[in-house]
Image: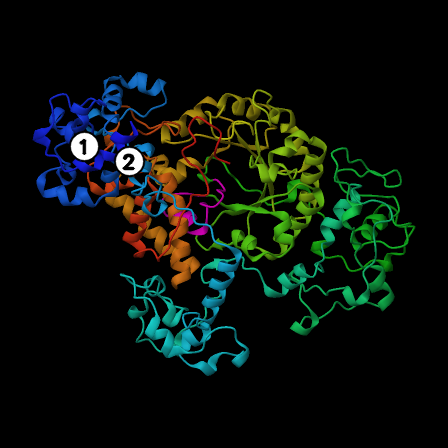
Amino acid sequence: MDESVIEAPKIENTELSSQPENSGEVHMSSENQAAMEESPIEASIKKEPSFQPENSGEFHPSSENQEVMEESPIEVSIKTEPSFQSENSGEGQLSPEKLIAKGIAPVKKEFLRPPPSSRSTNLDNRDENGKSDSSKSTGIVKEKKSKRQLKRERREERESALNICPAVAKTGDASSCKFGDKCRFSHDFEAYKSQRPADLEGECPFISAQKNCPYGVTCRFYGTHKDMPSESLDVLQGGADVNPLKKDVQKLLWKNKMKYPKSDAALKQLGLVGKGHTRVKEEEDIVPKISNGSHCSEDNGCEKYDTPDKQQDASAALLEPSADGVLDNDDSRPLKKAKSVDDDGIDSSKDVNNGTSLSIEGLVNVCTEDESHFPRDCLPPETDASLKLQPRERKLIDFSKKLYLAPLTTVGNLPFRRVCKVLGAEVTCGEMAMCTNLLQGQSSEWALLRRHKSEDIFGVQICGAYPDTVARAVELIDQECSVDFIDINMGCPIDIVVNKGAGSALLTKPLRMKNVIRAACASAEKPITVKVRTGYIEGRNRADLFISDFYEWGASALTIHGRSRQQRYSKAADWEYINTCVKKAPDSFQVLGNGDVFSYLDWNKHFSDCPELSSCMLARGALIKPWLFTEIKEQRHWDISSGERLDILKDYVRFGLEHWGSDSKGVETTRHFLLEWLNYTFRYIPVGLLDVVPQNVNWRPPSYYGRNDLETLMASESAADWIRISEMLLGKVPPGFTFAPKHKSNAYDSAENG
């Protein structure tokens, strides 16, 4: 068997006319070795010469298109495995009903083709000694480098002339850098111009948007604006994006000096601060707070509040609980000396720290209940910020039948959300951000909170395991970011999140879940929404037990994903259970459903089955075909062409270059996230190729030809073909480029996609 495989390439150029009549079958005998090497495409041409429709002459394997077929990596991978000819013919004989029962998409027979084989691809990648050669692989490439090699490469990159200072690149003047000789970037402008990479085709996205390009000579489209005066080029400060992380706030987070008055008071009122674990901040550690809620140091020009005397200012200092003082177990109860509070948040008991020092909120609460204990003139001036909002006083978001794009990790970035807004999305939400990373001031995590000006109804999603971290993150976002609502993820199934007690692990700890929601709602003025799954273990649904509790705890809306944590994405969403939960909810409580909405018929069915449903959240369906929003609005199946799909990808690339930058780093970042998205889009099957419409999100697409070359390329599951598509939009990949998808989007039968 091995010898026949190794010797096979010797007869690769055998003419088709020399093959025996039964060349469609696979035989390992010596007289049929020539038959084994026959291309399955050629065999299908002899048996079914009309496999292409009349309007698909662009891809018909005729002599004039032979050169295109030889260059395509799809065809190269197919020609090496003839055994799939019999399999595909067997599937082609099955009725659409039987194919659907097997979870296979019923593609019309004339478009089917033999699927590529991983085994044959591995055989093609072997060298002369029979060993696998990863450099020839057309799929995912993995490369391991030693730490010493990585360190050397980083040093060489820093010392390279290509690592030019942004200020010098913008103006062309070495004296424009304010750091001078201490700058860690190169100031050799002429050396960079002689080594800079060639420009990409097209126009600079900033010039197209009638803006000044902030990247100067480093822009990969520099030729389109090199004649513009450098003085008019302003450094980009977010542009149309909002919610940037301010540097003074980040420094406070790094030094752990940020103040959280609302969350600290809420935690104390809930009895989640242990006795003897509070301390009064020293005067030098007290950071003044400006009127708009942001924090900054004195040297930045901020003024302190005027107080009658220093003693009152010190007595009103906020109590900051230490990490040990927060009860982080599930059975968190109020302490014996800390009296429980009612829904209005009024506590008549003394402070847990022997009653010697009180926060501003605690002082107001005590004096409100019994004014005889304190004179009225001892109270600080009451402001809007000191008043606790009642649930009915919060600004609510009406989700009623609004097209809601779900928060999607990795691929739900700002450029993708802009694409969905153009196609009809009404509510958008940022990617999930971890509370601990936000409180540490990590720039990469704060980038997930960025918002574009076109996102008129926008929320952010956070994930945390404990009431203190979630409450402080909520208060920080409420003060520093422009958002319409804050969503708490209590359904994330990823192991690294669940093992920390966050995500869907909270479904097994109802008391902690209660404290998280109540502390978060008391720490922000924005509406707080919650996203959960049906339960933790398959067959043990628990979400319906907490429907009324979520409303009583202060949540403004609830989204239920119709799968358990154990199911991940492997089975169909349980919409019957979602409808059961919706009917148990209070009338004024908005409940949304999530799972497997892939057409306007799915959307309509869910509302007809349960009129009380507020809306549906669109997740994977929007990833695979973002024009799903348009289909729902126009109530039609859109048989979108490959050219129209390419235009959507062009918009994404343009939005990505505006967001991540048009320099080399921004181009490669855009390419990376484009490839992550293409890992989902290949699952879409055009409407005109299906025997049964609409497509189900859980159908496994067979290997098929498109109606033209581009449609066939977009249907490929090979990472090499995704890279080819990216090269059509962003130019050639750099030397040594590698790509491995972060998520496995094709987890049809097994719970692989976290």
x, y percentage for residue 204?
Answer: 33, 64
x, y percentage for residue 366?
Answer: 85, 48
Instruction: Judge from the rendering whether residue 648 lies leftward or rightward of residue 49; answer left or right.
Output: right
**In the rendered image, the vertical position of residue 380 relative to residue 95, given as above or below:** below
x, y percentage for residue 455?
Answer: 46, 50
| Quarter placement of the N terminus | top left
Viewer can see residue 581:
yes
- Tell us which disc is closer to us: 1 or 2: 1
Q: Which of the pair 66/736 is nearer the observer?
A: 736
Q: Residue at position x 74%, y 34% from top?
A: 330
Extreme residue toward the bottom, this view: 175
Q: Quote the CA–CA distance across marks 1 and 2.
A: 35 Å
**In the rendered image, the vertical position of residue 238 relative to residue 183, given as above or below:** above
Part of the protein shown in magenta:
406-426
Residue 39 - label: 1
**In the rendered image, the vertical position of residue 710 relative to residue 534, given as above or below:** below
| Amino acid type at image mark 1 | Ser
Residue linked to disc 2: 638
**In the rendered image, the vertical position of residue 226 relative to residue 604, given as above or below:** below
Magenta span includes 301: no
